Each structure stands twice: as C-alpha cells, then as structure tokens.
Amino acid sequence: MTSEFYQSFEFKLEFQNNSPFSFSQFEECDFYSFLPTIYQQPDVQQNIEEEENEFVSKIFFHKNEKNNKTKETTSELQQINKGDNGIFKIDKFLGNKINREKKPLFKKVGKRNHDKYDIDNIITVVQNHYINFIVMFVNYFLEEQGVNEKFIKISYEEKRKVNKENFEILKKKCLYEILLMKISPKNKLSPEDHNIILYNKVKNLPIIKDILNLNYLCFFQNVYYNSERNIILNIDGLDKPFKLSDRKLVLYKERLSSFSNEYYKTLFDNYVKEKYFSN
C-alpha cells in the first residue's frame, strides 16, 4: 500500500514537469481518489497501526514454539508498556529485570554445598586417616616388643563423627581409649570385644603402656602432623628416640602429598590447622 502511494506521488511530479497544464489545474483533480480507501478511514488506520505494533512485537520477542519451553520462555519474554507518547517502554530484556539484582546461576542445597572442599568432609578424611594411623602405630610397637596380636581398626561410623561436641571429647582422650571404640564390622574373624581383650593383656607392658596413655591431640600435633620418621617419646619420664621404619605408617604430610589438586591440598592443610591447632 505504501509503495502505491509513492508511485502515485512520483507520477504527479512527472506529470507536473512534462504536462502543458499548470500544477494548480492538476490539484483541482481529486488526487486522493487514487489512494486506497483504507487510508481515508481513521478507524481502519488505527487498526493497521495496532497490527503493525503486534507484528513488531512478534519479531523482537518471538516465542519458540518448536522447543515447547513454555516455562522458560515465559520468564524471558519482554514486558512492553506503551507510554503516553506512544513509544514502547521496555521493562525487561532477556530475563534481566531493570533495577533488580541478578540471581546466581547455581543454587546451594541446604545451607552449604557438601563436596570434597567442605570443611566437614576434609576433617572426616583427616580423622579417618589419623585414627587408622593410631591403630597401626600401636601395632608397630607391639611387634617391636614381640607381641604377635594386633588391634583391629575402628569402625568408620565412629571415625566419621566430626561435629564439634565429638571433637572436644576426642582431643581429651588417650590413645588406648581410641582403641577401645567399636571395631570395624568388616572384621568377621574376631569378636567385637577383641580390642578390649588385647588392651587388658598389654596395658602394663614397658613402652606400650606409655604409648597407650599418650594424649590424642598432642600425639596428632607432635607425631602425626609433624611427620618425622625419627621421633622422641616420653617413656617412664624420659625422652627416648624411636625410628618409624615401617612405610605402612603413612604420616600426615605423606598423606597430604598424595593429593594432586594443589588448591585442595592448601585448603586441606588450612582446615587441619584451624581444627587441631587453634585454641
């Protein structure tokens, strides 16, 4: 329709330049009779404007019906309000509301994300390995003293308790009290009270009795965390040197070096210092 209007207008100019008649004579003709009747009707003209507005809206804010993403598309549609001056006012663009903060892309489950970087999970790894080390350490000295029997590892359910209340209890215990905790159910060949029976047999042996009475927290700080193979233990009131030649006794720093992720190693060590060395 618009092109027909321009063609008529060009025809008028050409006719004016080439015609022997004056332009005033040409104006006497009913020129608007050549135009489509819809441009002469105000109601029809208004409908056309509304259709054009709707057409523009569909172009810019087209909804992809093929993907059937009703919920996602609804949240991302533009909301358009027509102002007093007839100009479109955009309130929303691609899901980002004006004057509102953007929401994070990822949600946390519960109060925190429970992955391997979580402090509770790191302390669980530390505590599990440390308590295993205690059992192996005592068994090492039992063998050194000619005792063939060995203590059985503690149940994982006991080792995984890392809440503050349990930790406060643990750090006041002696090593023998750790050995008397519930043993691992994986051991099917020994009775549930195996460690209790063995403890009563060896609790008064030289060297062994002093090791069994070492404090849980002090032993962590001075032996396990320090990670030296040449250690000094207080035996019968005297400091005596010992060498941990058994490579099965994996100390803290050796355990830490087994991790390949440098960020995890740094975070791991920071949490351990916070847990075992802070007041």
Image: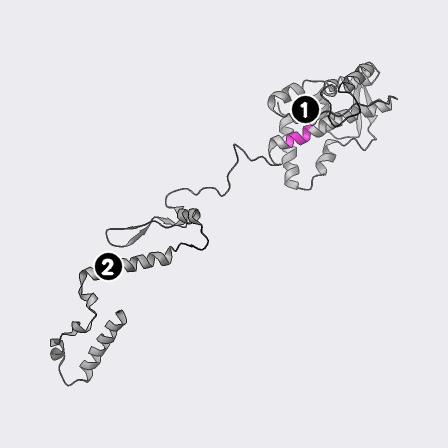
34 or 110, which lies in front?
A: 34
The mark that comes first in sequence, 1 or 2, is 2
Instruction: Determine whether 135 is above or below 261 in the image.
Output: above
- The residue indicated by pointer 1 is 158
- The residue indicated by pointer 2 is 47
Q: Residue 219 in the image: state x and y as whole percent.
A: 73, 23
Determine the residue positioned at 29% across, 60% down: 52
Instruction: Determine whether 52 is above or below 72 in the image.
Output: below
Determine the residue positioned at 20% across, 78% down: 12
Q: What distance separates the C-alpha of mark 1 from that of mark 2?
A: 78 Å
Q: Residue 160 in the image: state x and y as whole percent.
A: 66, 27
Judging from the image, what secondary structure is the residue with disc 1 in?
A: helix
Judging from the image, what secondary structure is the residue with disc 2 in?
A: helix
Residue range of the region highlighted in magenta in the rendering: 122-127
* Residue farthest toward the right in the current orientation of the protein: 146
Q: Quadrant of residue 43?
A: bottom left
85 or 2, which lies in front?
A: 2
